[in-house]
Amino acid sequence: MPPAASTRREQAHFTIQALALAVSIAAAGGAAAQQAGDAMTAPQVRASLESQGYTNVNDVEFDDGVWKADARSADGQRVELRIDPASGKVYPEDAVAQLAEADVRAKLSTAGYSNIHDVKFDDGMWTAEADDANGRELKLTLDPDTGKVVGKDRD
């Protein structure tokens, strides 16, 4: 094979590998941004909030395993919201916890988490750091009423 043909083939092979790597990185980023295929997208979050009476919805972003947004409530108040990425349940920043810290720790332990620490109630949701069954350290976001883990993010 002539040297030029060999070089073109190597360049094409390198280009294909680079493209495959870029696609896999983009897919991994999407997976990190949304835990599962059933997670809501930003436009779905915005539409869901608007259908619930929120207006001026902006700053919709995926962070700490949940969607976050700023909006105006039905009474015109500016609110910061957390949204369950799977169900779309809205958690206003001024929500009151129905569980105590000990309850949250117990629920996480029962769910198989270990090394549970930094448990706190902030912006209407419980957060904690813990190791999952595979030993990965995660930042968890929990429903303030039930203690259900609604968001997971690698710590």
Image (spheres, grey):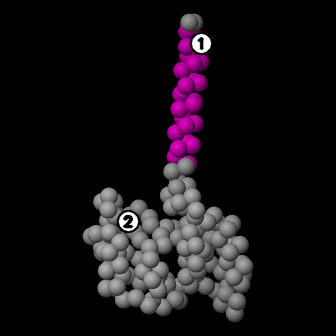
Reading the image, the residue beneath label 1 is: 5
- Closer-to-camera residue (84/61): 84
Q: Position of residue 98 (x, y in %)?
A: 44, 90
Q: Amino acid at mark 1?
A: Ala
Quadrant where the image shows the N terminus: top right
In primary-sequence order, the first of circles 2 and 1 is 1
Task: Specify whether residue 81 is in view.
Answer: no
Identify the disc placed on residue 138. Answer: 2
Q: Residue at x 56, y 84 (%)?
A: 92
Kindly give the residue lying farthest to the bottom in the view shown. 75
> How far apart in space, not on screen, are marks 2 and 1 (Cα)?
50 Å
In magenta, the rendered stretch is: 3-26
Who's the residue at 55% across and 55% down the image? 30
| In the image: residue 140, left or right of residue 57 | left
- Between residues 45 and 94, which one lies in front from this camera angle? 45
Q: Give the answer, above or below, for where 51 lies relative to 29.
A: below
In terms of secondary structure, where does tag 1 sit? Answer: helix
Left or right of residue 154: residue 15: right
Q: Is residue 48 left or right of residue 104?
A: right
Question: Is 17 contained in the magenta span?
Answer: yes
In the rendered image, residue 124, in percent from the top left (x then y), is placed at 49, 84
